Amino acid sequence: MNNNSKKVNKIRCFLTVVLLLVNVVCVTAQVKVGDNLSTIDDDSMLELESTTKAFVPPRMTTAQMMAIPSPLVGAIIYNINEHCLHQYKSLNGTLQWISLCSGNEIISVKLETSYTGTIGSAGITKTLDGIETVNTINGASFNDATNHITLPAGTYNMVFSYEGSVNAGSGSSIYISSYFFDFPKTTGIARIHSNQAHKGGGHSNHGASINYVGTLAVAKTFAFHIGRGQAGTYLGSSDLSPNGTFFSAIRILK
């Protein structure tokens, strides 16, 4: 072997050792950004330290967030529509973006204008004109044109509250109003009633809340409406106030 060959072999050995060292450094590297760059916890891969600057995660709209094709579980973004951090994680067995601003999420729809009139015979429903007042649930929506509410899969505490008055009518001998609300279930509905007794021969103020707690395995769309129950026997008209008539669904995060 000549001297040139020996030199080439030495260079190759040197480069091999350098590459091995580089690989070791890459595998065990720790990164510190900000202050005190020489100090990093032994168990940290990445540390950010500052008393004058903030960590800013990716900022995007709800539409942009939902358009991320395959986010990793645990991914975090800042939603500029809801002004809140969101994390991609499992809820009730379904991977989805979850708001980190509160323990629960809510959608609420209220009566848009006063409703005046009789709600037909027992079992007949009346779709109410509503307006969305708050919505912090990803995937939930209210359709102004059809007055339908859509809830994504999840566990909910649902409430329908109403406030109004009943005109029992002259000569009436029984004065009972009966309302029901059809709460959504994975399959079918849960029809819950509320009965109220009234002063005869004139107007009587009334109000109540109807509650239902249930889990939706899939997204459901349903109407914002009330119906007249079997116990409803008043002869006159019923009025509802927009100030106290609304539907709310609180999604319970586990």
Image (cartoon, rainbow, N blue to C red):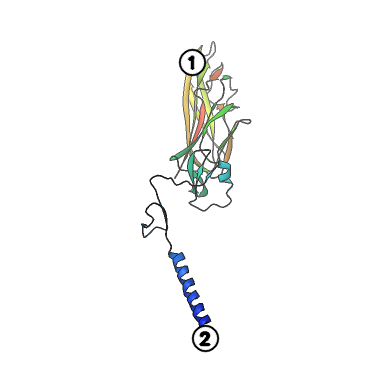
* Residue 207, visible in the rendered structure: yes
Q: Earlier in the sequence, mark 2 or mark 1?
A: 2
Residue lying at 54% horizontally and 84% vertically, measured from the top left: 4
* Residue 92, visible in the rendered structure: no
Residue at the far bottom in the pictured view: 1
Residue 122: x percent and y percent?
Answer: 57, 25
* Residue linked to disc 2: 3
The relative height of residue 92 versus residue 188 in the rendered view (above or below) is below
Residue at the far right in the pictured view: 145
Residue 44 placement, left or right of 63: left
User: 231 or 67, which lies in front?
Assistant: 67
The relative height of residue 145 versus residue 169 in the rendered view (above or below) is below
> Quadrant of residue 149 in the image?
top right
* Residue linked to disc 1: 204
> Quadrant of residue 254 in the image?
top left
Mark 1: which amino acid? Ser
Are the residues tagged 2 and 1 within 8 Å (C-beta)? no
The relative height of residue 92 versus residue 225 in the rendered view (above or below) is below
